[in-house]
Image (spheres, rainbow, N blue to C red):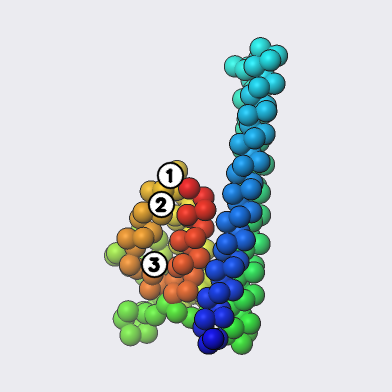
Amino acid sequence: MTQTDDLALAIQKLASEANEESAAAKAEYEEQLRELRARLLEGRIARSSIAQNGEEELEEAYQARLAKIQSELDESLLALYRDEAGGTDPGGGTDPGGGTDPGGSGSDDAPYEVDYTLPMQQRYIIVKNYYLAYSDMAEALSDLLQDEVAQDYLGQYYSYLQQLLMMMQ
């Protein structure tokens, strides 16, 4: 098994663990929401501000847990890539202009900033934030899968973003 294969397996394992944790968080959130709604119906206050506040608190806790999972996965991947690259940012994305892109100018084909002078982690964050701003994660995933600029720009991080969006659907 090559070093690249080992890296791919490690990335897949990290993404799989994050997917499982996210699925468990979603199941727990949905169960808590059902329990809350049942208690509110029992108390005949299902349409009150108490109900709305309770649901909002559960949603905020769920989103915070997803953000924590995402953050932990980001940190793990960054450490993995640094170890693999000998302390530098992972490569994979290339500048289609032959390495002459001065950076910051963006791309006409991408709705987000494309700056090949940025470290890979910052590139990933820019693209990730763009797609996480979608209200419909299925649409975000569909758009990402059609985004050829992101595939090149993110290199190895592209598959990680794809896994993240799949887990958030």
Residue beneath the point at 61% across and 55% down? 20
Q: Secondary structure at mark 1?
A: loop
Q: Calculate the distance from the C-alpha at mark 2 to the C-alpha at mark 3.
A: 13 Å
Residue 164 percent location from the top left of the image: 51, 58
From the viewer's perspective, is 55 left or right of 140? right
> Few, some or many C-alpha atoms within 10 Å of disc 3 (few <14, some 14-19, many ≥20)?
many
Q: Earlier in the sequence, mark 2 or mark 3?
A: 2
Residue 125: which disc?
none
CB under 8 Å between discs 1 and 3: no
Amino acid at pointer 2 = Ala
The vertical placement of 11 against 97, above or below, is above
Which residue has dot 1 on it?
136
The three-letter amino acid code for the residue at tag 1 is Asp
Q: Evaluate whether residue 8 shows in this view.
A: yes
List the single residue furthest toward the left.
108
Q: Secondary structure at mark 2?
A: helix
- The residue carrying pointer 1 sits among few (fewer than 14), some (14 to 19) or many (20 or more) residues within 10 Å by Cα, namely few
Q: CA distance from mark 1 to mark 3?
A: 19 Å
Q: Which mark is residue 150?
A: 3
Q: Which residue is mark 2?
A: 140
